[in-house]
Image: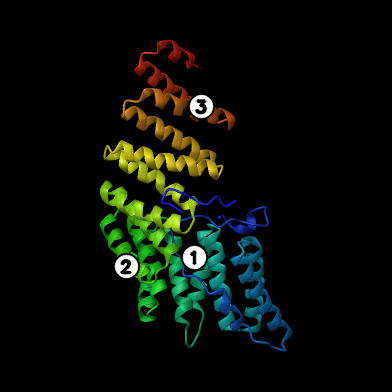
Amino acid sequence: MSDGEWKNNKNTSPTSVPTTRLTPIKRNTITHEFDPSAADAMFAEDSDTQLWEASELLRQGMQQQQAGELIAALKSLQKSLQLFEVIGDIQQQEQALSFLAVVTYASGDYKSTISYAQQCLTLKKETPDPSIQMQAFSHLGNAYRHLNDHNKAIKYLEECLKITRNLQDKRSQVAALNNLGLVYKAAGNLKQAIEYQEQSLKLVQELQDNWGIEQVLKNLGNAWYALDNYPKAIAHYEQCVKVARILNNPRSAIQVLKNLGNACYATSDYGKAMTYYEERLQLARELKDKRSEEQSLGSLGVTCEALGDYSQAIKYYEQRLLLARSIKDRRIEEQALASLKVACYALGDYAKAMQYQE
């Protein structure tokens, strides 16, 4: 597969959502994942019916969470927690609360995430499980980040990072460093954000984890872009797209290609911008992503204008106009008409410009 080719492969309180399945919210967070292959080790056979039922519900909730069935997972885990509380099994309460934080975070219910993670940390245990504590601090930090409480987010993610280093857990260090970078970026401290994410990138490259590398490169590109350092943003975005091609992950690349084209445009490298916008347009059409398609057509039209090629700009704007009408998006239709009039006037084709008067 060449660099330009792609294989064509064909979260509010969850209890208030009237569906049976929620798609996890996409975000730049890297989570500390539980190993589902190790799940069976948590559940010992027991003759106590209530304990067996609680363990089965916990197992079921974990499996539902892995499958993305978040509302079903929430219900299973809540029932499991209630039974473990009745039995007085603190260790399994800790597991249930930790997974409830995972599920509510995945569905975007950050207040519930905070509640479950704090309950997990305040359980009275003689020997707390550092891995569970790490998870709880991570979810607290990430939830507070989404709620824009940056000071609390930093406090909890730094606690998480300390534990990952004590455990010498490189994979979890990657997550903690990346997520700290996201908080500092959200707080406007871009230099500190970059420092953490560069540490994260070094570790994830040592682990040869392409999925993690792709995510951290994207976050670094975004941070440099926010600093208006377009050459460094471009360098990280280009690496990110290369990794996305290796992973055959066009949905990720379609996001990065937009910023990559914009960064090239900002440096007046219009030819390179055209290349990336065209690749994004191709991917958008393969994925039937109408929103990315219309954005790409608009970007291509603007770039053609910057190159002085108004005839080609008009072709892109006409395609955007047809697409806007097909999806009945009045706002985009008005934008496309306005762009067409400007380009026609620039060519001196006033008769054609009149055709696009509303």
The Cα–Cα distance between marks 3 and 1, rounded to whole angstroms, is 45 Å
Residue 202: assigned label: 2
Q: Is residue 224 left or right of residue 254?
A: left
Task: Using the rendered view, name the quadrant where residue 89 is placed.
Answer: bottom right
Give amino acid for label 2.
Answer: Lys
Looking at the image, is mark 2 or mark 1 nearer the viewer?
2
Q: Which residue is mark 1?
A: 114
The Cα–Cα distance between marks 3 and 2, rounded to whole angstroms, is 45 Å
Q: Which residue is mark 3?
A: 321
Task: Using the rendered view, name the quadrant where residue 277 is placed.
Answer: top left
Determine whether the residue tagged by mark 2 lies in a helix, strand or loop: helix
Residue lying furthest top: 351
Q: Is residue 71 left or right of residue 317?
A: right
Examine the rendering and report whether any part of residue 229 can be seen. no
Determine whether the residue tagged by mark 3 lies in a helix, strand or loop: helix
Task: Using the rendered view, name the quadrant where residue 286 is placed.
Answer: top right
Categorize mark 3 by other alpha carbons within 10 Å: few (<14), some (14-19), many (20+).
many
Categorize mark 2 by other alpha carbons within 10 Å: few (<14), some (14-19), many (20+).
some
- The percent position of residue 173, horizontal first and vertical second, equals 38, 72
Q: Is residue 166 left or right of residue 108?
A: left
Q: Point out the tag, 2 or 1, that comes first from the N-terminus.
A: 1
